[in-house]
Amino acid sequence: MVGAFIMQGSEEMYRFDIKEISKEAALKMIQKYHYSNTLPKINKHFLGFFLDSELVGVVTLGWGTRPRHTIQRIFPSLDTKDYLEIGRMCMTEEMPRNSESQMLSQLVKWIRKNIPELKVLFTWADGMLGKVGYVYQASNFIYAGYSVGEMYMKDGVKLHVRQMKSFLVPEGQKDERITVRPTAEQMRKHNILHFKGKQYRYLLFLCDGKERQKLVEECLIDLGLPRPKDDDLMWRVKDLDTGKWVESDEPPYKTDVDQKSKGLVNLNM
């Protein structure tokens, strides 16, 4: 029965019907229920999780902005064809708290059945926004260390450095640079803050034991690190007067910039 659930102790255990859905349907769900209102740049699968024909969850699979670099800095022998990254994952507010773990478990089964050649499932927990990845820890993902990420923010709206160009370069003016960073003067003028924080890596092996052992032996990252907790979160903000990074509170995040919210951060006023 589609969308059936059973009771295990005091918990409801759901059996989702997983289907590929349109990009538009996935984005609509993400904009409503995910803390970010945007999709990653490179998407390969948009998966809908249904209960009794009602869409209650979405997971997108694809890659980040540097797919080969991401995987080869962990496993040098792998390439983009060998892994996928969870880009976005969200559920309706009505679903119980443990539902995301169940969704992840059934996502893995779907991947094994439909993309059996995949060796690794990869994901990030955005420590910049106060997330250390508890749902991945509960789902037996392996913690693979962290990298330090950066984020520009204006009035609670997150601006990636690659998005700066459209705001800082006047319309119609040619600029061959891929990224354009604001000067201290521009940051003061437009009330832009520049933060740094931790981004936590997680992975799950999907390959057989022999292949897994080979990957563990070549892995460039310690896979036995203690899992991060809230106390491990860290933020720094750029002091425009000294040019130094100083400790700060969690950034006052509201949303990501996208085409619809561009007016919120129109720097060319």
Image (cartoon, helix red, strand yellow):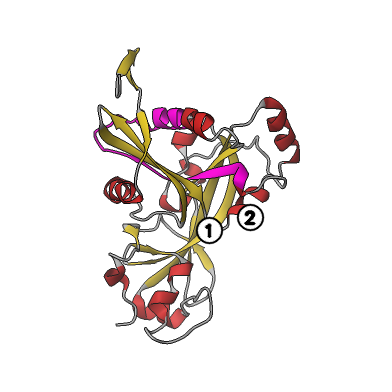
Extreme residue toward the bottom, this view = 173
- In the rendered image, which quarter contains the N terminus? top left
Mark on residue 65? 1
Which of 177/236 is in front?
Answer: 177
Up/down of 191 relative to 185, above or below: above
Q: Is residue 71 magenta?
A: no
Residue hosting label 2: 69
- In the rendered image, which quarter contains the C terminus? bottom left
Q: Which residue range is magenta in the image?
A: 81-107
Residue 152 percent across, percent down from the top left: 43, 66
* Residue 258 placement: quadrant: bottom left
Query: Residue at the spot x=48%, y=77% of the render?
Result: 241
Residue 26 percent across, percent down from the top left: 33, 46
Can I make out residue 241 in this image? yes
Extreme residue toward the top, this view = 9
Q: Is residue 85 magenta?
A: yes
Up/down of 23 relative to 230, above or below: below
Can I make out residue 10 in this image? no
